[in-house]
Amino acid sequence: MGWLPWSSGDSNKASDGGRIAPDRTSRARCWEGRDAFFACLDRNEIIDSIKDEKEARRKCAKEVAEFEAACSATWVKYFKEKRVMEYNRDKTIERIKKEDAEKVKELKSQGWKSS
């Protein structure tokens, strides 16, 4: 795994001892792996690939392997958690909009006029 910019190989260390950040090509490859993995999760109606890891690995084995090979472990974890957070955020926004629409409809039925 020494070819990955964030792997543990000494050749990926900067002169000050820190790690060299992934370049544009490495990031693009990671995002492509993430997108393919998330598309597979969507096809299989899996939202949380951390909580449902066994099912995700069973149904999306090829995609998860490519995703994990293309991205650092911290990026994989971050993207998986972000997916769940964004799903929950979108569902909350959807619920609030629905509740607001119902409230406006109720107010209009009582004679309220919007400006």
Image: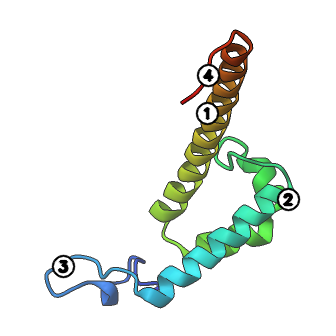
Q: Mark 2 and 3 residues: CB-CB less than 8 Å, in contact?
A: no
In the rendered image, the vertical position of residue 29 relative to residue 52, given as above or below: below
Mark 2 or mark 3: which is in front?
A: 2
Q: Which mark is residue 48?
A: none
- Choose the circle earlier in sequence order: 4 or 2: 2
Q: Residues within 10 Å of mark 3 (few under 14, many from 20)?
A: few
Q: Mark 3 and 4 residues: CB-CB less than 8 Å, in contact?
A: no
Specify whether residue 105 is in view.
Answer: yes
Instruction: Read off the residue under disc 2.
Output: 43
Of the residues shown, which amino acid type is indicated by label 4? Lys
Mark 4 or mark 2: which is in front?
A: 4
Residue 115 image point, x, y percent: 54, 30
Instruction: Read off the residue under disc 1.
Output: 92
Instruction: Read off the residue under disc 3.
Output: 17
Q: Which mark is residue 113?
A: 4
Residue 48 image point, x, y percent: 68, 45
Of the residues shown, which amino acid type is indicated by label 3? Gly
Q: Secondary structure at mark 1?
A: helix
Cα separation, mark 3 vs mark 4, equals 66 Å
Mark 4 or mark 1: which is in front?
A: 4
Q: Residue at x 72, y 21 (%)?
A: 105
